[in-house]
Amino acid sequence: MRGAIILAAIIALSAALSLTLGEVHLGLDALWQGLWGGDGPGALTIRIIRGPRVAVALGAGAVLGLSGAIFQMLLRNPLAAPDVMGFTAGAGLAVVAALSAGLILPMPLVAAAGGLAAAAVVAVCAYRPGQSVAPLTLVLVGLGVAYTIAALGAFVVTRLPGPEAAEAQRWFAGSLAARDWGHALQVWGIGAVLALALVPQVRALELLDLGSDLAGGLGLRVGRARWLLALTGVLLAAAGVAVAGPIPFVALMAAPLGARLAGARGATGRLAAAAGAGAIITVLADLAARAAIPGLQLPIGIMTGILGAPYLLWRLSREMEKGEL
Amino acid sequence: MTLKAEALTLGYRDRVVIRELTLSPPVGKVTSILGPNGCGKSTLLRALARLIRPISGRVTLGGKDIHAEDTRALARRIAILPQAPLAPDGIVVEDLVKRGRTPWRGFLAPWSEADAEACAEALAAVDMRAEARRSLNELSGGQRQRAWLALVLAQKTPLLLLDEPTTWLDLPHQIEVLSLLRRRNREAGTTVISVLHDLNLAARFSDHLILLGPQGVVAEGRPDEVMTAENLQRSFALSARIMPDPVTGAPMIIPL
């Protein structure tokens, strides 16, 4: 309970900071007016420009964090995450490819298809008949798939005309520029549906935490439960990518950070904490990206990259010390 | 309720580990499965617990193929403790034991009186009531194994399968675990089937032994029937002399 309050307080504080700080610094009075329908210039900035952006950041961060937590618990490996394993890159590539081909399709569906395709490629590449796949193998194969997709994405971008190429490249890095309330509604709506779908699977996640043999002995249909959880995880990540691009490292960092902040132990607590931590990381990284260097608005992905890459290195060295790598 | 393996062939992809094996451990007894490394003991146990599908043949419980049954319903009748279960990070003993109640609890069902009772009883059976709130990773090896046992005891199944429940334990703790299982058998009538390594302990704590060799079952029956020099030769290629142990009279193996 204390953990939940701490997380909620940090989320509210981050959101308030992100709404008031930026190229134009606003006071708390403008924030107040903006929230309750006032119409000064500050209030409009908040309602039309920063409000949707922060709402999208919170939603996208939460679904990415949730997705990362699912894969880390499912594979029992802190390196497992939809961004490390190429699922978000797959979703991102599908969106960029669809846009560049001029297809008018709902972005969440395109992103979901791309994410699932990338996951299928990872599963097929890691599959060895008659053997169970080690989690680390999945992570490493995913890493390879992620690089391949990034190369494909770079190729697609070079085929685009100038301004569109710049736009696509920016989006591919993960960007929250020019988001409106429609995007916010979309990621929150889809996120809520998927979170509800996750509720009945929490028990399966808890059982899988005991190892698949004991989980099976306790009556879980292990194979089916794993596939359903992976599907939910990929769809959650895709929902985030559809509105914010494949922001790197949020999914990787959210679960451990959330567990640390909230002191969560059980599966439900860890999932909720990961969603909260994902939201916090995304909102603050976006704030830093647009306010750190005056006059320069960086895509959020560059910020999470700066944070996330050292984290990944540290995590790798930890795993090596434990002898897992 | 009889658990039965019928013409069971088990293996992985192109490697057959167990061929055409038929057996049925006696109901309400303590049975131990023995055999050399790689003879398929663990594979057999996992197949009996429907964790792997046989290549051919079937495992039946009360005459019905276990793979045709609802897995949750089956988990109320057969519990298995695998050789190396994984402990969730930082979990306390009580929460671990509670997971044993999973097959009895409906979707979103609240924690019931019966659940609480089963857990309390399981903790008492392994003498861990005082450690209920302790974190699993601060416990000694023996205590940890007792916590895992409490989990499967809380499952309240008439059949209990255990894959080498005494590995990694020192001798006193091995004896503790095996006595505990035998007590459970005598008091609750639970059928206990374990894979064991130590021949002397198995002979002493079991009612029934199944001795496997490279070519399948070598002998099956009471410990004094199974533990013969000839059987050990055929199963383990071990030359040994068998003597009744001076305390209980159970067969004692002295390797030559």
Image: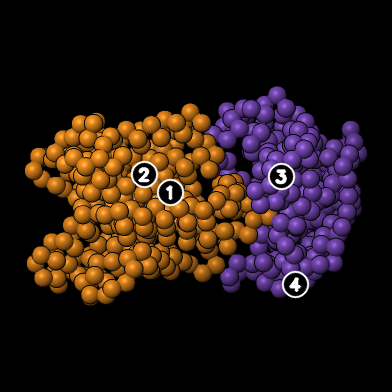
Chain colours: A orange, B purple
SS label for mark 4:
strand
Which residue carries the number 1 mark?
A66
Disc nearest the viewer among 2 and 4: 2
- Chain holding disc 2: A
Label 4 in the same subunit as label 3:
yes
Residue A55 rendering spot, x and y as whole percentages? 32, 47
Residue in front for this viewpoint, A120 or B48: A120
Q: Are marks 4 and 1 on the same chain?
A: no
Classify 10 Å Cα crowding around label 2: few (below 14), some (14-19), many (20 and above). Answer: many
* For residue B52, above or below residue A47: below
Q: On the picture, is B107 further left or further right than A321?
A: right
Could you give the CA–CA distance between mark 2 and mark 1, rounded to whole angstroms? 8 Å
Q: Which residue is mark 2?
A: A278
How crowded pointer 3 is (Cα within 10 Å; few <14, some 14-19, many 20+) is rated as: many
- Asked if one can make out residue B183 in the rendered structure from this viewpoint, the answer is yes
Chain designation of label 4: B
The image quadrant that residue A274 belongs to is top left
In the rendered image, residues at marks 3 and 2 fall on the same chain = no
Q: Quarter of the image holding residue A233?
A: bottom left
Q: Quick check: A87 left or right of A77? A: left
Q: Is A168 left, or right, of B90 in this rendering?
A: left
Mark 4: amino acid:
Gly
| Disc 1 and disc 3 on one polypeptide chain | no
Q: Residue A34, how many percent across, how many down?
A: 26, 40
